[in-house]
Amino acid sequence: MTSHLGLDLGGTFLKWTVVGHDGAEWRCMDSGSVPTRAEGGARAIVAELVGCALDAGARFGPVASAGIAVPGRYDPVAGTVRFTPNIHVDWDGVPVAPAVAAALGVSAHLINDARAFTLAELRLGAGRGARTMVGITLGTGIGGGIAVDGRLHLGLDGAAGEIGHLTIDPDGPRCGCGSRGCVETYAQAQAIAAGCGTQTAEEAVEAARAGDGRAVAGLAEAGRYLGIAVSGLVTLLNPDVVVFGGGVANAGDLLLGPVREELRARVHMTSPDAVRLVRAELGTLAGAIGAAVFGAEASGLGQAMPKTVAVPA
């Protein structure tokens, strides 16, 4: 069984995992995390990534590949990060994948964290066995990914699957991306908390479970807007399954019930009830697991993937 390293760069923690692959099955072998110390700037963060990579590699012997999930945009050719909305440092061409590759002596690949989540759930989690899958992460923002014919679809530059920035109201509120009426403006954690009359989305879920009418209605409204976006995706992609992850997904049927109602109202070119709407299974390690799988597959050491550009060791 070959070992592959996954790193997940988060605003609070830097997570790592070593995933084993025997040609057919994937298995998470070990994992850990350290605080993300953004106060030192981009180069300090990269040094943390390299340190975690070396420590993880030492636990399970040499790893065959590495993948790094980043919460933002990146350059897949140069292996650099362009922008991280929740990590406020100036990346300015600082090498990320090349630094990890040089430390480990293997190729390294960057991937967006929501796409990593999608790949992890496709291979090891709630989407196992799916041919076509949509992954959606619900939290501070809304991220996503798309898998078609069992392969993660990345698009031109790795940005395919930005589900949170689908326009559902052309005259809606301004979104952080610069557009208007994105689904993220209606169903992100802050919007849910405001609609439910709570300080946080977690409190909104607790209040709704306790029978608070405003919280129940607020989650239903967010689910309705999310369902409008998902209806478009189902009509376009006809997926087997839509997997919902992130803290807000813990609302379960309080949120996903209204999503299902929108599908039944809006999807008429296929059977909306044939599409499974499920919660993710891999928890907070999904990003690191997906990064490890992506690094392996992009290096030609796992299931075939679309052509990507490797950062050599």
Image: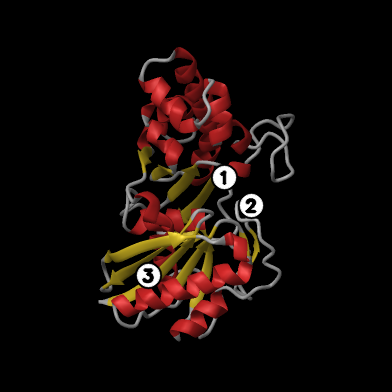
The answer, for residue 221, to whether it is visible in the render is yes
Label 1 crowd bin: few (<14), some (14–19), many (20+), radius 10 Å: many
Label 3 or label 1, whichever lies nearer to me, is 1
Image vertical order of residue 58 relative to residue 190, above or below: below
Quickly name the residue at label 3. 303
Quadrant that contains the N terminus: bottom left
Q: Residue 101's spot in the image, x, y percent?
A: 50, 81
Label 2 – label 3 distance at C-alpha: 31 Å
Looking at the image, which is closer to me, 117 or 269? 117
Left or right position of 103 against 90: left
Image height check: is 62 above or below 80?
below
Residue picked out by circle 2? 85
Disc assigned to residue 80: none
Q: Position of residue 102 (x, y in %)?
A: 51, 84
Q: Nearer the viewer, mark 2 or mark 3?
A: 2
Secondary structure at numbered mark 2 = loop
Task: State the CA–CA distance, disc 1 to disc 2.
Answer: 16 Å
Report the amino acid beneath label 1: Ile
> Left or right: where does residue 278 sit relative to residue 154?
left
Which of 28 and 263 lies nearest the eye of the viewer? 28
Q: Which residue is mark 1?
A: 163
**Figure check: 310 above or below 243:** below
Which residue is found at the position 71% from the left and 29% from the top?
172
In the figure, residue 99 lies in which quadrant? bottom right
Is residue 80 at all visible to an observer of this figure? no
The disc, 1 or 2, on the residue closer to the chain's N-terminal end is: 2
First reached walking from the N terminus: tag 3 or tag 1: 1
